Image (cartoon, rainbow, N blue to C red):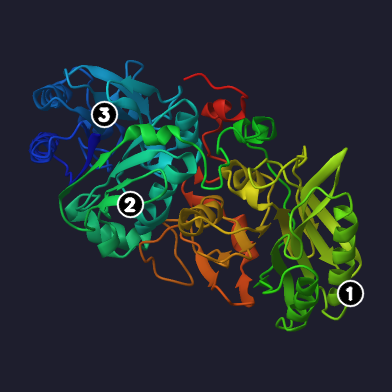
Amino acid sequence: MTRVAALQFASGTSVDTNLATCIEMIERAAEHKPDVMVLPEFCNHISWYDDADHAWEVSLELDGVFLRSIAEQAAHHKSHLVINVSLRRQDGSLTITSLMYGPEGSLLAQADKQTLMGHENFWFRRADQLSPVIHASIGRLAMFPCRDGVTFETPRGLALRGAQLFCDSLNSFALDEASLHVPARAPENRCFLVAANKVGPLIPEDLLQQVSDDTHIPLRYLYGAGESQIVSPDGQVLAKGPRDDQAVVWADVELAEADEKRFKDATDCFETRRPALYGPIATAPLSVSVPDAQPIAVACLSPEQRGEGAIAEACELISRLPRGTRLAVLPELFCMPWSSGDTMPDCSMRVIEELALACKAREELLICTSLPMSQGEGIGLFAVLVGESGLLASQGQLHSGARFDGLQQAESFECIDLPWGRLALLTAEDVRHPEMAKLAAIKGAHLLAVPGRDLEPWEAALALPSRAAENRICLIYSNLAAKNCAGMIADLPQDFTLMTPWAEREFDGYINQPLITLQQPGQNITSGRVNLPAANNKLMSEQTDLILDRPWRLSGELVRETVDD
């Protein structure tokens, strides 16, 4: 077993005092004898500077007193120690850098921040090389700071290169970072994760009120949000710190468990990837023409019957939908079991005809489900879109899964433009891969419609909400076997961009948390609205656009068939 610890504390404006705090917290954590200690982001100085000279003055040299002292602590306590600081570089630039010191006190690796947040773009340069995977005596370790873990690319690349443990240093006041984005990175990659966040003010105390007034952020939310945590590969939070106080959070983990990459249904989350499809993720962002969008009423439908009875029940549920509903999603294969019978495509066409007839009585209603249809020389599973005129669009399943035998895969992914916005259809197997929601956002989709299957707990709590939030895209998911969640409508809040006035809500600590409506087990119809125009705003903060400023330059490993460790 490996003992890991997250150290949660405050930093201020005195570099010397901050060093003393780091040492004090390391000694406190050492009482638990951890093999790995992870400290927060910006341990040397809070991320607030008067000007470029000030940012340089409070940043560190690799061989300076501050970091030599940290190395001595790692050696003294025989522990791997991860710390994040602002670092001076030989070319005169500054980087936000995570450093790992080994049990002998040597510097094992350093990882520069790839995705800068807001004002960080003024003072620091982005990483120009990949973060390393460290092959330590206890296992394969990797580091990334804060914003790099609020999007999937950096952790995904590290996991593909064999990382077993993510060490995440944070400097965040966002409550949704701890509740959603941080823990999502562990199960979607089947890795362990240790995340260490700040508490205390994140800007100089004498400027708190002025900054609150200028940024429209209430004073109480200009403090580190704490909740440092340790997360297992299945998404279980093994230990979690408080929101406001200093803390040492620790747990024992078996890192070898992170080598098992299969979901509970035996599908391997990496072997089923389709890197050839993901090219745009590693390509310079281009301007995308996006149609106008409007808010629409939507619904999840879940028939109780199976087989022939489910078709009639689905049509009856359609007749009961609220007036004005524009899109309703049925679960995958809601009326038929999967088999390899040659008659399945014919059965699917009959189902489509029945759904089209049901739509004729409902003005402008569209129905989405997934059905088996001819694909090449075999049969594939297709997410289909049906209107009163019949089949309007379809998207073949792109990723294989252990649930279906002999399924043919589609070779391309496209969106559909409709009078109310741009729609992306995905099958349940495809939405498991975070790459696909990113591709949909890159293509300008406002909404993801997913005819689903039963969800693992982490998928309902973390995967689907994070797909919506991290890409600013609405989502509808509906499934039959409702052990955990029978369906979900994920809407977007209108207010999003930091440092600007918010019209519909006061900032409440949640930057990017989707508005979730859950379909409860046994509930046949769940209705809601999705604010599709909100999906056009991807700007989280100045110079931090979720799509335009993603770390595309260092995402090449995500689109290669084989990745070296």
Q: Position of residue 364 (x, y in %)?
A: 82, 73
Q: Position of residue 313 (x, y in %)?
A: 76, 77
Q: CA distance from mark 3 to mark 1?
A: 68 Å
Is 11 displayed left or right of 99 in the figure? left
Is 500 displayed left or right of 361 in the figure? left
The residue lying at 73 percent from left, 46 percent from top is 397
User: Is label 3 in contact with label 2 (beta carbons under 8 Å)?
Assistant: no
**Above/below status of 367 relative to 184:** below
Q: Residues within 10 Å of mark 3 (few under 14, many from 20)?
A: some
Mark closest to the chain's N terminus, 3 or 2: 3
**What kind of residue is marked 2?**
Val
Query: From where the camera sits, is residue 441 visible?
Result: no
Mark closest to the chain's N terminus, 2 or 1: 2
**What kind of residue is marked 3?**
Trp
Is 539 displayed left or right of 49 in the figure? right
Q: Which residue is mark 2?
A: 237
Report the disc number at residue 56: 3
**What kind of residue is marked 1?**
Leu
Q: Hey, which quadrant is residue 391 in on the image?
A: bottom right
